Image (cartoon, grey):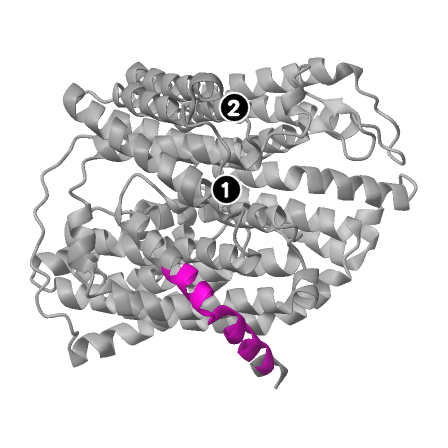
Amino acid sequence: MAGILFISVGIAALVVGAGYPMGTATRMGAGYFPRLLSVILVVFGIAVALSGLRKPPVPATFARIVLRPAVAVTGAMLAFAALLSWAGLVPASIAVVVIGSLGNRDFRIGEVIVFALVLSAFAALLFVRGIGLTVDLF
Amino acid sequence: MELLDSLVLGLAAAATPVNLMYCLAGAVLGTLIGVLPGIGPVATVAMLLPLTFKLEPLSALIMLSGIYYGAQYGGSTTAILMKLPGESSSVVTALDGYEMARRGRAGPALAIAALGSFFAGCVATLLIAVFARPLSELALRFGPAEYFALMALGLVAAVALAQGSIIKALAMVVLGLLLGMVGTDANTGFTRFTFGLNELNDGIGFVVVAMGLFGIAEILLNLEQRQDREMTIPQVGKVWPTREDFSAAWKPSVRGTLLGSLLGILPGGGAILASFAAYTLEKRLSGEPERFGQGAIEGVVAPESANNAGAQTSFIPLLTLGIPSNPVMALMAGGMMIHGIAPGPQVMTQQPALFWGLIASMWLGNVMLVVLNLPMVGLWVKLLKVPYRLLYPSILLFCCVGIYSMNYSVFDVILTAAFGLLGILLIKLGCEPAPLVLAFVLGPMMEENLRRALTLSRGDPTVFFTSPISAGLLAAIALILIASAFPRLYRVRQEAFKDG
């Protein structure tokens, strides 16, 4: 699995970087080093994949990614990014805390709302008052 | 006594009220995150880096380094009291420390861990002071070929010392180097791998990478695994160790310090490896290895000394050669660059107050930690009662605001989320993120030096072998690669990590 990841990234880098000027070893172009690295990455990827094949498959150790926290945390960060510019720091902070908390199986709505309010007020005080971050609060 | 003069200069710079305050803040914060499992020094330094913009460079560095070695102190507290290592570098401390606590000797275990750390901190500070000058003088003679070879050595050593599969770690290094290529090429102005996104023209921020791969991924991992467990905290009891404790502990402490100092200097080393290696060493040397795991005081003091020594000496390659040896140091390098200081041999000559002030602050910080740590144990333990369901949204929020404030870029926040997902994926695939982050930081520097070296030699690649320093470094790389391919050494390596 890891091997496949490395191989595909390596090939993708080769394809994307295909048009970059190579230059010569003396006057190296922008594409020289990346091309070198891409090739090495593909080679290592193949090696990883081969060594993975040689061993008996170990399905037990490969745990799949649990979806709930991944979605909640990523969603919280995306919401922050989306809300910050047009709604301001306080709504964005509340969104992070509330959406992020959804990643927890033990989600308590009342507690989360209170906590989100407290934290966003704290963040506003610390970052805007304390450190002078120039961002709209609302 | 040039060394003494320098240290006095450093003390004068570090002992101003403002800097003392930041030193204390860093040390306390470090202890705090050391106590709390689920947030490590990498994520904390990454989170706080943006907040140090407005500080004096010295104050900023003092605080950030305090977090790193403070975490080594804090990690031991919960390891001993609850068998809950707050930091991965305290995993082995938990083995014997918790046994001591269960036998009613929590107090002496905590005290000896703190004293051992303190001793190690003092020695390591002195080592930095002694070795800094000769090393940076050597580094000033380095040309591009030597630098390229040195960085390659650093990366290979990081691979050899990483946990798990070597070939995967090598691939992670190359992946990191490639990620470092994103953005505008410094030599030709050509933009690479930006996919037409203007936000990527300046490259990917290293804080974005570090915070994503360590901070966010760590949160995701914790959320998957976490079950809030009941905590019973043993009585701390009498604190002061007995005379027998001291006589049993001082030799392991010295050995741990030396081993830790050595492993800290090595690229890829640092606190975690140092503590594991010191524990294994003591177990080997001991006449009664069966006592280990049953509350042997050697098993507490050696790794605690080693991890603190390693945490501090890992500053040596950064400050003298400009090469970070682990992810925390990579962030420190970033912290220096934010303030317009290029880490490397010239820091000592051009900014002596900054250089020696940072070193002196480490000693001051260690004094503060040993004084603070024991009386405050009760407070730290109470902090553990903060449930993770409240802790992690706070961390998440701080990460978001922190990243945004680096460049006022919403795009960076999104990118960090993506790296968080990549991080958890890589962890699941058994690939350690540390080599990738190191390579990411070194990538652009390596390319630059490779180009310069080959331009100077008119494209002749033998330049790397004809320069004696470069050839020596390349030989070391070959040695490491051959050695790590050997099964016997591989087994020793496995064993060193297995004890956790």
Does the stretch in magenta take in B39?
no
Which residue in the protein does label 2 denote?
B410
- Gap in angstroms between the C-alphas marked 1 and 2: 15 Å
Measured from the top left, where is residue A18 in percent x and y?
A: 76, 15
Residue at point 66%, 45% (across, down) = B152
Report the amino acid beneath label 1. Answer: Pro
The boundaries of the magenta stretch are B5-24
Of residues A130 and B262, the one nearer the viewer is: A130
Measured from the top left, where is residue B6 in percent x and y?
A: 59, 77
Residue at point 31%, 22% (across, down) = A100
Which residue in the protein does label 1 denote?
B50
Q: Quadrant of the N terminus of chain B?
A: bottom right
Measured from the top left, where is residue B451 in percent x and y?
A: 81, 39
Report the amino acid beneath label 2. Answer: Val
Q: State whether discs 1 and 2 lie on one chain.
A: yes
Mark 1 surroundings within 10 Å by alpha-carbon count, few (fewer than 14), some (14 through 19), many (20 or more): many
